[in-house]
Image (tube, helix red, strand yellow):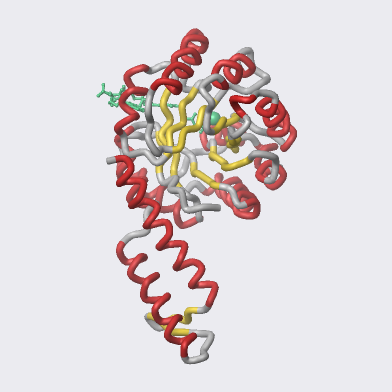
Amino acid sequence: MDSRPFRSALYIPGSKERALDKARSLAADAIIFDLEDAVAIEEKANARELLAQTLTAADYGPRAKLVRINGFDTDWGDADLAVIALARPEAVLLPKVNSARDIQALAAKLEGREETSETKIWAMMETPLGILNAQEIAAAPRMAGFVMGTNDLAKELNCRFRADRLPMQFALQTCLMAARAAGIVAIDGVYNAFKDDAGLRVECEQGRDLGFDGKTLIHPAQLDVANAVFAPDEAAIDLARRQIAAFDEATAKGLGVAVVDGKIVENLHIVTARGVLARADAILQLQKAMS
Ligand SMILES: CC(C)(COP(=O)(O)OP(=O)(O)OC[C@H]1O[C@@H](n2cnc3c(N)ncnc32)[C@H](O)[C@@H]1OP(=O)(O)O)[C@@H](O)C(=O)NCCC(=O)NCCSC(=O)C[C@H](O)C(=O)O
Ligand SMILES: [Mg+2]
């Protein structure tokens, strides 16, 4: 997995022209152009045309661009893919994935077209069967990332929304494990109360501590919190630098272990430390490219 930042992945309804325009200047690491749940049934056809035109004409810079189409078990999935394919999408995000077969079917459709020969697949992880099949889904062809769909999952589980997300922990951790085993990105679910910054921060911190790369968002006001929480802070960068320096010094003396802040530092910690620095640098590069 590379260090491309996915701290913030903002959903934008494909039907909202103003929001589509606004997103070109927002500090989102990734944009999820949505044709699924954010778009009303009567808007579906217009939204896919508007989105295909927008993606062909507009410049979203270095932000990762994912298009969430409707599922192929709906009236809109095939038409979404046919129209969106013309815009050569970087990635297609498939909702309500249940098994690797769902991914294989999409991969076969992408392979059938020259415009989508490079298109990656991302999976919404939001059904009980999908969670139980996370490992095979992550390892399926063209897979590049998981997005947690915690709203759909809560609906399916009939669980309650709790601040500690206890009912979600099995799903979050199972998907994270599968994503890491396959070397793909894993992005946490949305925080619905988009005016509650304090609650968003708590949930972002939990997702970050679990190991997620970032958070999906529904409103631009949520960007700053997610970008800050999922970036290595000054203390983490400083520690990483000191660990690398101490380990280099220990190695030069023929030792395999260093001690920093009273804790041992071995080669595996150096891999983590280098990852922290690589992520911090990738964020800096992305910010420069956006400015
Ligand atoms: C939640 C909203 C409906 C709120 O909309 P609104 O009341 O219009 O917000 P504001 O007036 O505060 O907007 C201020 C400006 O920001 C722009 N805006 C708003 N939202 C977005 C956005 N998502 N991306 C880009 N720009 C946005 C407005 O256009 C205003 O701009 P300006 O007029 O120039 O000042 C709305 O935010 C919204 O629709 N959000 C997206 C909802 C969505 O995508 N839902 C589906 C994804 S969540 C999901 O499905 C998760 C998963 O599948 C699961 O199961 O969990
Ligand atoms: Mg959903």
Image quarter (top left, top right, bottom left or bottom right) of the C terminus: top left
* Rendered residue at 40%/53% (across/down): 282
Front in this rendered view, residue 249 or 46: 249
Horizontal placement of 219 versus 175: left or right? Answer: left
In the displayed structure, 258 sits above or below 84; it is below
Inspect this view and state whether residue 158 appears.
no
Return the residue found at the far bottom: 253
Q: Position of residue 106 (x, y in %)?
A: 68, 28
Q: Give the answer, above or below, for where 108 lies relative to 50.
A: below
Residue 74 visible within the image:
yes
Return the x and y of residue 266 as percentages of the image width and height: 52, 79
- Front residue of 272/126: it is 272
Spot occupied by residue 218 in the image (x, y as percentages of width and height): 39, 32
Q: Nearer the viewer, residue 262 or 155?
A: 262
Q: In the image, what residue occupies the spot 40% across and 39% down?
A: 62
Residue drawn at x 33%, y 50% is 228
Q: Is residue 225 left or right of residue 148?
A: left
Residue 284, placed above or below residue 77: below
